[in-house]
């Protein structure tokens, strides 16, 4: 069995670490915070997760919240202007329900499980010196978190990274007093063309069930009003103002006024969607392997980040198991990432296509879903597996053929 080090106690790092321990490997996991510190901090992400990724957690027995997390079994998309004039609306059922567990709830419990299984959990703010020490003492070192000098070790892959700057200003909020949508609970995507998006779904946080939403503003646009927002109260007030101003249909769900679930229930930032080369070379010449957001970072708009992290961890787990006693060399690392990229290129395209000016063929597909319940069902399940709508969602010529086939079915 191998000796493996992992930097990062997030979705991908802990998933991988727990899986490796269950397979009999020796695992050291380095985190810059304890579980208690994570639980006491601010929210880390929106982590909307769907059937495939949740199934991978069930395989490891770490789906501890099945009976208390509110599920959502549908998806809807609305394109409407600031006056509430609707240009497009569809909704469809998911074959498997999704759920969202606040990572301040999830990661501490997973850390406990990692330690219960015999993992070595180390608290350290990892830098290059840490990686050098880990790489010298382990058969494989995986970097699943890291900014600054650690993140900079992994070089951007321009062929797989069309953007060089953030495409949205992001504001994440966990709230009470925001009524569930009518009907089946769902992930709700609302687009105000040329201005931004509002995405909401049910979740489980420190205090229990809640609603989680993200406001995505086009930089420099009418919703980009966050520069002077400093406190959680300011953040909440601005969120409600933007919701009432630019998404009036969704604002009807507000029960009086929005209420934060707790003082740490807000997060703001900007993300540049980036795919990096998966292997980094340390000053000593030793190599380390990237995992998750470190090497494949998506904008949160389509809710793929935590799902990608779980799927990547599974691919790495299987590849490590198949390696046997062979060394974890550069060629192996690159081949494993290419196996992951064979899937990840679809959620990357799924998200990046939505961030830019929507291509005409994509809008035709989404418009057709208004009147084609079967297509709406397919699109609702595309959140779970963006590869399932290839090639027609991503290629104009294939879309033409696909839509012609749908029209023939309806005739």
Image (cartoon, rainbow, N blue to C red):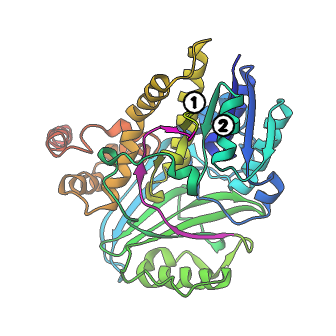
**Quarter of the rendering containing residue 84:** bottom left
Residue 60 visible in this rendered orientation of the protein? no
Residue 46 placed where, x, y %? 58, 58
Residue 295 or residue 341, whichever sits in front: 295
Residue furthest front as drawn: 284
Residue 232 placed where, x, y %? 67, 79
Is disc 2 in contact with disc 1, using a CB cutoff of under 8 Å?
A: yes
Residue 274 on the magenta span: yes
Residue furthest bottom as drawn: 228
- Where's the C terminus, which quadrant? top left
SS under mark 2: helix
SS under mark 1: helix
Residue 121 on the magenta span: no
Q: CA distance from mark 2 to mark 1?
A: 8 Å
Residue 233 placed where, x, y %? 67, 84
Q: Residue at x 43, y 39 (%)?
A: 385
Residue 27 placed where, x, y %? 74, 30
Q: Residues within 10 Å of mark 1 (few under 14, many from 20)?
A: many
Residue 314: image tag: 1
Q: Mark 2 — residue? A: 15
Which of disc 1 and disc 2 is earlier in sequence? Answer: 2
**Which segment is the magenta one?**
265-283
Residue 33 or residue 171, whichever sits in front: 33
Residue 357: image tag: none
Q: Residues within 10 Å of mark 2 (few under 14, many from 20)?
A: many
407 shown above or below 361: above
Q: How many marks?
A: 2
- Where's the N terminus, which quadrant? top right
């Amino acid at each position: 069995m191998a000796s493996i080090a992992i930097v990062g106690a997030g979705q991908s790092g802990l998933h991988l670490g727990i899986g490796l321990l269950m397979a009999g490997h020796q695992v050291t996991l380095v985190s810059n915070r304890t579980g208690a510190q994570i639980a006491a901090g601010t929210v880390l992400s929106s982590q909307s997760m769907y059937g495939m990724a949740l199934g991978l957690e069930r395989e490891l027995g770490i789906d501890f919240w099945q009976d208390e997390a509110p599920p959502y079994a549908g998806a809807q998309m609305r394109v409407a202007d600031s006056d509430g004039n609707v240009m497009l609306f569809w909704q469809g059922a998911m074959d498997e329900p999704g759920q969202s567990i606040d990572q301040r709830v999830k990661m501490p419990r997973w850390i406990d499980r990692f330690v219960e299984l015999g993992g070595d959990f180390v608290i350290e703010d990892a830098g290059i010196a840490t990686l050098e020490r880990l790489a010298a003492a382990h058969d494989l070192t995986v970097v699943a978190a890291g900014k600054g000098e650690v993140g900079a070790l992994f070089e951007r892959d321009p062929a797989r990274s069309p953007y060089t700057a953030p495409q949205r200003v992001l504001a994440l909020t966990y709230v009470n007093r925001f009524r569930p949508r009518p009907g089946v609970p769902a992930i709700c995507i609302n687009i105000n063309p040329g201005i931004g998006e509002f995405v909401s779904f049910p979740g489980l946080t420190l205090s229990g069930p809640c609603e989680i939403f993200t406001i995505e503003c086009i930089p420099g646009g009418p919703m980009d009003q966050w520069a002077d927002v400093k406190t959680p109260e300011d953040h909440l007030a601005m969120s409600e103002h933007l919701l009432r101003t630019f998404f009036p249909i969704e604002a009807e769900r507000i029960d009086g006024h929005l209420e934060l679930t707790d003082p740490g229930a807000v997060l703001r930032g900007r993300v540049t969607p980036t795919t990096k080369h998966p292997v980094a070379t340390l000053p000593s010449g030793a190599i380390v392997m990237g995992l998750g957001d470190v090497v494949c970072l998506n904008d949160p708009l389509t809710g793929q980040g935590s799902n990608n992290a779980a799927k990547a961890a599974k691919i790495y787990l299987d590849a490590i198991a198949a390696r046997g006693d062979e060394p974890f060399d550069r060629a192996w690392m690159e081949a494993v990432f290419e196996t992951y990229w064979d899937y990840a290129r679809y959620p990357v395209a799924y998200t990046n296509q939505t961030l830019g000016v929507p291509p005409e063929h994509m809008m035709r597909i989404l418009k057709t879903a208004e009147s084609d319940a079967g297509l709406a069902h397919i699109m609702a399940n595309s959140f779970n597996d963006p590869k399932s709508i290839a090639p027609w969602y991503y290629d104009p010529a294939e879309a033409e053929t696909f839509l012609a086939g749908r029209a023939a079915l309806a005739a």
